[in-house]
Amino acid sequence: MSVWDRLSAWFLGLPLVHPAAVWLKAHPDPAFVILTLLKIVFILFVFLTVVSYLVWAERKICGRMQGRFGPNRVGIFGLLQPLADVVKLLFKEESMPGSVNKVIFSIAPGLAIVPALVSFSVVPVGPGLAVTDVNVGLLVFLAMSSIGVYAVVLGGWASNNKYALIGGLRSAAQMISYELAMGISTIGVILLVGSLSMVEIVKAQAGWIHVFGLPLPGWFVFTQPVAFLIFMITAFAETNRTPFDLPEAESELVAGFHTEYSSMKFGLFFLGEYSNIITICAIAVTLFLGGWTWPWHWLPESLQFIWFFVKLAVLVFVFIWARWTLPRFRYDQLMDLGWKVLLPVSLGWVVLTAVVVYMRMPR
Amino acid sequence: MVPALFVGFSALLLVSALLVVLHRNPVTSALFLVVAFCALAGIYILMHAEFIGMVQIIVYAGAIMVLFLFVIMYLNLGADPERGAAIVMRRLVGWLAGAIVVAQAVLLLAGRWAIGPAGPPLDPSVGNTQALGVLLYSKFLFPFEITSLVLLVAMVGAIVISKGRGGKPNSSPDPSPEATFMGAGDARVSPMLRPGDSITPAASIAPAGEESP
Amino acid sequence: MREYLPILMFIVVGIGFAAVTLGLSAIIVPRRLSARKLAPYECGVEPMGTARQRIDIKFYLVAVLFILFDIEAVFLYPWAVAFRQLGLYGLVEMILFIVILLVGYVYLLQKKALDWNASQ
């Protein structure tokens, strides 16, 4: 029984006499809607807190890697820095060039943040701790990441700025090229599970497996190493992070598609970028690192979400680590890698996985 | 609940579809088409066709509309390039296509091909994705394999259109010598322009969109 | 059906969050406009011309190829979910499907359609 179920059971079992409570108990549908709404608002709150501390962590780790301290003035260890940043962004003057297409210019930052938030709704954080479990969960994530392209291409186009337009176009071409390999790299996992539901995918990774006699946790990273590698490479490209941060290559394109953005509109793009990192790492944890599962029974079921966050933190650290370690790709190299390496390799891996699954099928 | 959602999605679909046609700015039209596709996906999900709904978003809203946007930006048409008879022809074809759709809708609603009762419930853990897979790869195997040939033809067609037949580039719709293309430069040389290139916009190309003076 | 409602609600809440944030900032941010601030940013140089220029055909080609391979990927999902029911039959027909598309892929390589810097 998950925390949510317990909470709703607790609520429905309360000896409430208030007419509203009585009405809710008699009407399960509105009660479901209200509980879901509370759940969503709670998850949104947690998610945004995690995202703002990701920004803090990135600056802190970056500082350490460069022999600095990073933010350390606002609060102890600079822990209140995200709050200060938000306040600053909210009160910054907004400068919008006169030549922009105002409507699309204002919609684009929203398009950057909404898909990243919505994809998180299918991620099971712990047993029963997902906003929802749908049987096409993985496709919800892929659909949302395909909508995410619009934020950059429309933001770049609406700005009526040459840097922004080129940044937006490059970004769109890059994202769609890598989306292919990302989508195909997940197929191996589906072949092993036989379902698109995220919860089923996590459950299939519980326990131990034996690879050539070696006992390993049942996580798909051990049975699908190539797919995991491709997924992580494409994840870097999808989130426009170094070494694939061509859309905003500072030395060439100023700030790429968000050159003309300032104040909270820039803030939403910024938030969207970091939300995307969290979401895509959460999906990678779910697909390849076993989600909330842990090979030993160290924690009771209600606390297993901790494993999810531990794995998430490791992957997010890899993202930050890569940013301060790797140089940027050249654009033609980037397209070459996407189309000539990742696409054929991911397809070949799918065929290989299918053959192995078929051979091991009981007859 | 379901009827209310159906009405909501249908209203969103109709309004955004109308705005696609009625809005003057092609990029905004494209954006409304994305909204229309998403609303349609919602309707599919209400009809228990969740796989089709998701594919609707992934392929139509996520892939085909990106192509539309690129084409809009490639052409960058300020004013309608077609004149006189071409416009009349286009309207004629448009009305004809509309009439065919209306006729189909009438036939459907008249009950000839009305949708029958819902099939037996599917295993909720896999849903219609698995049912679709089993059907598609056994009963409808031939159409599926034909699809790969169609995709192959489309691939060849795309190359021929964009690269020209004999390896020579196709002439652009408006081959004015001073026309410049954003992002056309060699990535090894510079992000956008080679030395000596001009970034003066072509005089013959009017800036698109509603913000042109 | 019920399990899809939270996703719809999440979309609505997400849009609401973005709208409230942008609305709040629209109310409280100061605006002191000037002609310089209204000009597009071009590294401090007077902006030359407009950015509403026609873009390279390469982007069109990438988008078309993306659609084609995306459709292929979409066919893979129901196949992967139903793979255990289909058995050898499913394996062979999907390999056939991929091989036919591989022919197209080789053609793309031959035509240098996947080379970003190939001279047009």
Image (cartoon, coloured by chain):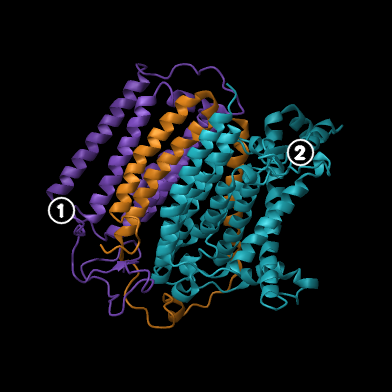
Chain colours: A cyan, B purple, C orange
**Mark in front: 1 vs 2:** 2
Q: Secondary structure at mark 1?
A: loop
Estimate the x, y position of residue A265 in percent, counting from the top left.
54, 64
x 27%, y 51%: residue: B159
- Say few, some or many: other residues with alpha carbon within 10 Å of mark 2 (under 14 / 14 to 19 / 20 or more): some
Quarter of the rendering occupied by the N terminus of chain C = top right
x 80%, y 42%: residue: A296
- Mark 1–mark 2 distance (CA, rounded to whole Å): 63 Å
Q: Amino acid at mark 1?
A: Arg
Q: Which residue is mark 2?
A: A4
x 54%, y 56%: residue: A233
x 42%, y 34%: residue: C95
When asked about the image quadrant of residue A154, the answer is bottom left
Give whichever of A109, B163 is nearer the camera.
B163
* Disc sitting over residue B83 in the figure: 1
Give whichever of A73, A215 is nearer the camera.
A215
Estimate the x, y position of residue B19 in percent, counting from the top left.
38, 47
Quarter of the rendering occupied by the C terminus of chain C = bottom left
The numbered mark 2 sits on a residue in which chain?
A
Give whichever of A216, A188 is nearer the camera.
A216
Residue lying at the far left of the rendered structure:
B85
Whether residue B76 is visible, yes or no, is yes
Q: Is residue A55 left or right of residue A144?
A: right
Estimate the x, y position of residue B204 in percent, counting from the top left.
20, 67
